[in-house]
Amino acid sequence: MDRLEQLMKELSEANGVPGFERDVRIKMEHHLAPLSEEILRDRMGGIVAKKTGDANGPRILLAGHLDEIGFMVTQITDKGFLRFQQLGGWWSHNVLGHRVTVQSRKGDYVGIIGSKAPHVLGAEEKNRLVELKEMFIDVGATSKEEVEEMGIRLGDPVVPVSDFFLMRGGKWWCGKALDNRAGCALAIEVLRELQGQDHPNTVYAGATVQEEVGMRGASALAQLVRPDVAFALDVGLAYDTPGFENYPAKADLGEGPTMFLLDHFMIGHGKLRDLVLDTAEELGIHVQMDALMGGGTDGGKFHLHGIGCPTVAIGFPTRYVHSHNSVMARRDFEQALQLVTAVVKKLDNKRLEEICY
């Protein structure tokens, strides 16, 4: 694996469900620190690296989010099985039979998400969706006392198990938590691209926490940075798999980065959107557009900060998001990196005034 693949492997394989992002934050800080003059942290766990081009220019926020979807232990049965609640949005079809890591104060334990075997299911049971509340985690214990001896408590985080891997000779990146360790990696790499280059602003590149449970960390990070312009760096949905033949949107792996026109929480800022699209045209980059009313990004909080902060969400088409294994294209990441870097280098005070007024 090359450097970029190693970065994605390190970030995606780290464990960090909402409220428990510390391990990912430490890894991200390791990569951000050599590229910045200062590391800033909010009290919820968000982190940004500061790089000054022009101290009198606009404050630009580039942020992914550290957290991934997962679960929390909420009950221990008398026979030592764990019941759980979801942290972030899961479709229960994607959950049964998978391995998870239960993180306790005494260490990590492998568990299996289980339910009844198909051999004993009646016809009605076989044809219905199994709800998460019916599932359980088997950590190999035989009693509640054994679970307690393992150090597992109510409130402990549970993380999907999936290694990062490559497909198509490295053209496709695959694994857990691409939503949104890919956005975290993009923030790091934009800062790397800006090393030794002039830019008419101060860049704050990093990541929030608890995006998957309601963008909770975005408000804290915006309060810390006080941005004039913000970019939410996050994955989008790919519509190039079976079942989307008649879907109104189009977003294919390898056909360019995604920008959201709007989502459930934000309408992308019109003039900032135009600046991104004009820059993409200059660079020969095809930007795929989406309007996803069933979800949102941290931009939903960034754009409301202070007296208002022009914000757009930029990312990459990704298959099978909110499951144990997702797939995205390296080319889309590299083009998003080129595009965001170029836009940042244009954002001076004059451009900010044109955008806002």
Image (spheres, helix red, strand yellow):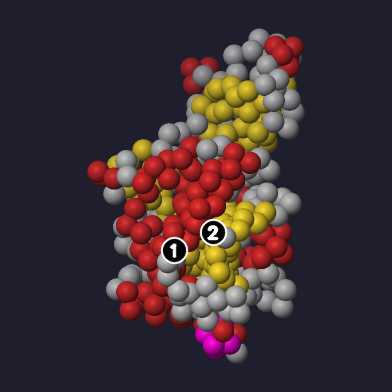
Identity of the amino acid at label 1? Gln
Towards the viewer: 192 or 127 = 192
Res. 62 image quadrant: bottom right
Residue at 51% over, 27% down: 99
Res. 294 image quadrant: bottom right
Q: Is residue 256 above or below residue 28?
A: below
Q: Is mark 1 on a helix, strand or loop?
A: loop
Residue at 60% over, 24% down: 108
Q: What stretch is highlighted in magenta?
A: 350-354
Q: Which residue is under mark 1?
A: 195
Residue at 50% over, 31% down: 161
Q: Which residue is under mark 2?
A: 36
Give left or right: position of 235 versus 166. right
Identity of the amino acid at label 2? Ser
On whether residue 202 falls in the magenta region, the answer is no
Image quarter (top left, top right, bottom left or bottom right) of the N terminus? top left
Query: Predominant secondary structure in magenta?
Result: helix
